[in-house]
């Protein structure tokens, strides 16, 4: 299986933790495509079988930059349909995140503040 997205869990720790079962027992915060420019930037702490929710197709949206009413909801299995902007609320915009932007999003999430990149990528409603 080709990895197209990474999942990030709602798990904070004071020190490094490689217990994959403990990490995977936490809720998933978000799943995004990540541009891994430096494969050594993030240490691989292990491998395990994917949990059932992670085997499901990822659903995302696209929104026309000129006509914000023109949206498409699609999954990575190739299914797509036209959608109204309000139907895209809560979905990730199809984008590839740089590693440092993912790190900023995680830090902002754990600090309880909005993330500028995430806010910029949210569906435009008006």
Image (tube, helix red, strand yellow):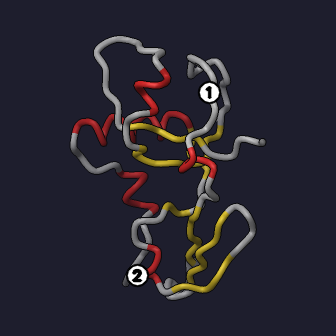
Q: Residue at x 58, y 21 (%)?
A: 41
Name the front one of labels 2 and 1.
Answer: 1
Q: Is residue 57 left or right of residue 23?
A: right
Mark 2 to mark 1 CA distance (whole Å)? 36 Å
Residue placed furthest toward the front: 52
* Number of residues whose C-alpha sits closer than 10 Å to that of mark 2, classed few (under 14), some (14–19) or many (20 or more): few
Q: Which residue is mark 2?
A: 86
Taking 125 as reference, is 104 above or below it? above
Q: Is residue 16 above or below residue 76?
A: above
Name the image quarter holding residue 120.
Answer: bottom left
Give the residue at the far right of this rendering.
Answer: 1
Residue at horizontal 60%, vertical 58%?
Answer: 58
Mark 2 lies on a secondary structure that is helix
Badge 2 or badge 1: first in the primary sequence: 1
Q: Is residue 116 left or right of residue 8?
A: left
Instruction: Find residue 45 and report its image quarter.
Output: top right
| Quadrant of the rendering where the N terminus is positioned | top right
Element carrying mark 1: loop
- In the image as oriented, which residue stretches furthest toward the top? 15
Instruction: Give the crowd class for mark 1: few <14, some 14-19, many >=20 residues within 10 Å.
Output: few
Give the side of residue 30 with respect to residue 41, left or right: left
Q: Which mark is residue 48?
A: 1
Image location of residue 104, percent across then percent down: 39, 37
């Amino acid at each position: 299986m080709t990895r197209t997205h990474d999942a990030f869990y709602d798990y904070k720790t004071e020190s490094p933790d490689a217990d994959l079962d403990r990490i995977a027992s936490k809720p998933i915060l978000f799943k995004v495509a990540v541009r891994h420019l430096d494969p050594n930037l993030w240490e691989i702490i292990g491998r395990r079988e994917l949990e059932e929710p992670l085997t499901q197709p990822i659903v995302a949206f696209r929104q026309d930059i000129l006509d914000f009413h023109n949206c498409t909801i699609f999954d990575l299995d190739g299914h797509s349909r036209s959608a109204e902007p309000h139907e895209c609320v809560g979905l990730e915009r199809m984008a590839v995140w740089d590693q440092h932007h993912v790190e900023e999003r995680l830090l902002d999430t754990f600090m309880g503040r909005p993330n500028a990149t995430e806010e910029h990528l949210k569906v435009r409603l008006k």
